[in-house]
Image: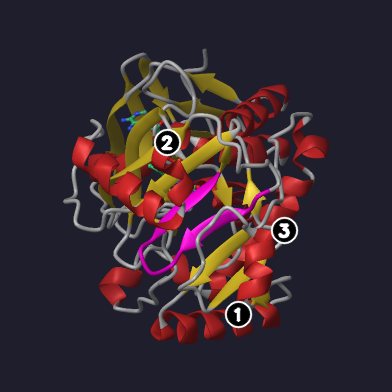
Amino acid sequence: MQAKADIVIIGGGIVGTAVAFYLARERMGSVVLVEKEKFLGAGSTAKAAGGVRAQFHNKANIEMSMLSKRLLCRFKEDTGADAAFDQVGYLFLLSDDKDIRVFQDSYKLQKSLGLDVHLLKPDEIARRAPHVRIDDIKMATFCPDDGLIDPHEFVTGYEQAARRYGAEFRLESEVLDIGVTSGRISGVRTANGEISTPLVINCAGAYSGKIARMAGADVSIKPYRRQCVTTGELDSVTPDLPMVVDVRTGFYCHPESKGLLLGWSDKSVKASFDISIDPDYTDSILELALDRLPQLETAEVANQWAGLYETTPDHRAIIGWAGEVDGMFHNTGYSGHGLMHAPAAGLITSEILAGKKPSVDVESFSPQRFAAGTIVEETNVI
Ligand SMILES: Cc1cc2nc3c(=O)[nH]c(=O)nc-3n(C[C@H](O)[C@H](O)[C@H](O)COP(=O)(O)OP(=O)(O)OC[C@H]3O[C@@H](n4cnc5c(N)ncnc54)[C@H](O)[C@@H]3O)c2cc1C
């Protein structure tokens, strides 16, 4: 094990692992990733619903997704592994006139950026999603090459390829402190030894605020509990059905192991690191699901879990150098979009560190935007 590294990545979720892959592949120096748990992807990544979509309201988020989808399409070529990217599409159901206006604006922006996105009328919606009640739905937007991925295969693929390019992964190595000498990062102290390094990349997801504070820096990220439920086998479900999002309520569902995965963001949840399952939260998901999918009346709950959204005040990631200390780069705060944006997150970090122009202009993701008051909110948050 090295006691010295050119770059230490803190956090072995999908973002840290993707960053490790791109830095190692681009030969950016010795790379060590430290993760506090026994396996990679044990944090929010393991809890993700697997959705990948480019239908955002914010230009930079659309571009992050479009780049990530291109990288996902060549994931096997790049890593040798299959992330099971299944492009079944995302269907956003619209019943409120206010939402329709916002989605029509987003549609125009998405089209102008080259996204293959469509406005659907009710008869076309019924053809795409015959399992869903749509008598109150006026319109939908649909992007056929949005889709689903398997979080576990995704992390493992990046990890194994990064190892082949020379990156080192240290598990059960919680970062306990970060050394700063004369305003510069000098090393990290982990539960498994010290590593001297001039450069730390903060990919600790919901825990990124704690990591930043160890170095005297700050990132505006709060953890919010989010839950999912899966059903047993359902006759009405075929694997080609799209991800369906009911925009009015925020309820979403997609095919999962011959049944459905059901999810919803309870916006009344208070910020905390609590990931115990709240039965009332589960009941709310089931209630919303029954309203949209009446055939679930007889369905069984197969599984349920809770995880954390690593949420910023404007629901957009934080990518860039910490202003308070030299040598700390934040790549975090994806606010519920981290799985889908991880490929772009990894590539862009390697480009910035190499002094190149990043493939997506991430100036608006700067850690300093909150203090500067230059916030542009992402409103299409599920
Ligand atoms: C219910 C749910 C559904 C979701 N669905 C989707 C979806 O469909 N699509 C999508 O794109 N996103 C989804 N997300 C969001 C997605 O899971 C996250 O955005 C993404 O996993 C963030 O990845 P990450 O690597 O930044 O964070 P994490 O996966 O949380 O990784 C951070 C890692 O840092 C480690 N760590 C923390 N502190 C330390 C320390 N001191 N020392 C060492 N290691 C440390 C943690 O153990 C963890 O493994 C969902 C999230 C939830 C909860």
Q: Which of 120 and 50 is in front in this view?
A: 120
Residue stretch rendered in magenta on the structure: 241-254
Q: Is residue 382 left or right of residue 75?
A: left
Identify the residue at horizontal 38%, vertical 74% (top origin).
Answer: 377
Identify the residue at horizontal 42%, vertical 15% (top origin).
Answer: 38
Residue 359 seen in render: no
In the picture, the quarter occupied by the C terminus is bottom left
- Mark 1 element type: helix
Q: Where 250 sits versus 333, above or below?
A: below
Mark-to-mark CA distance, 1 and 2: 37 Å
Amino acid tagged 1: Tyr
Q: Mark 3 or mark 1: name the one nearer the start of the chain.
A: 1
Amino acid tagged 2: Thr
Q: Where 48 sits versus 364, above or below?
A: above
Q: Specify whether residue 247 is painted magenta.
A: yes
Mark-to-mark CA distance, 3 and 2: 32 Å
Residue at numbered disc 3: 145
Q: Mark 3 or mark 2: name the one nearer the start of the chain.
A: 3
Mark-to-mark CA distance, 3 and 1: 15 Å
Residue at numbered disc 1: 107
Do the residues bearing badges 3 and 1 touch, measured as CB atoms within 8 Å? no
How many labels were placed on the picture? 3
Amino acid tagged 3: Asp
- Mark 2 element type: helix
Point out the residue furthest to the right here.
77
In the rendered image, residue 12, in percent from the top left (x then y), is placed at 47, 31
In the rendered image, residue 83, in percent from the top left (x then y), is placed at 68, 35
Q: In this view, does 131 lie to the left or right of 4?
A: right
Residue at numbered disc 2: 298
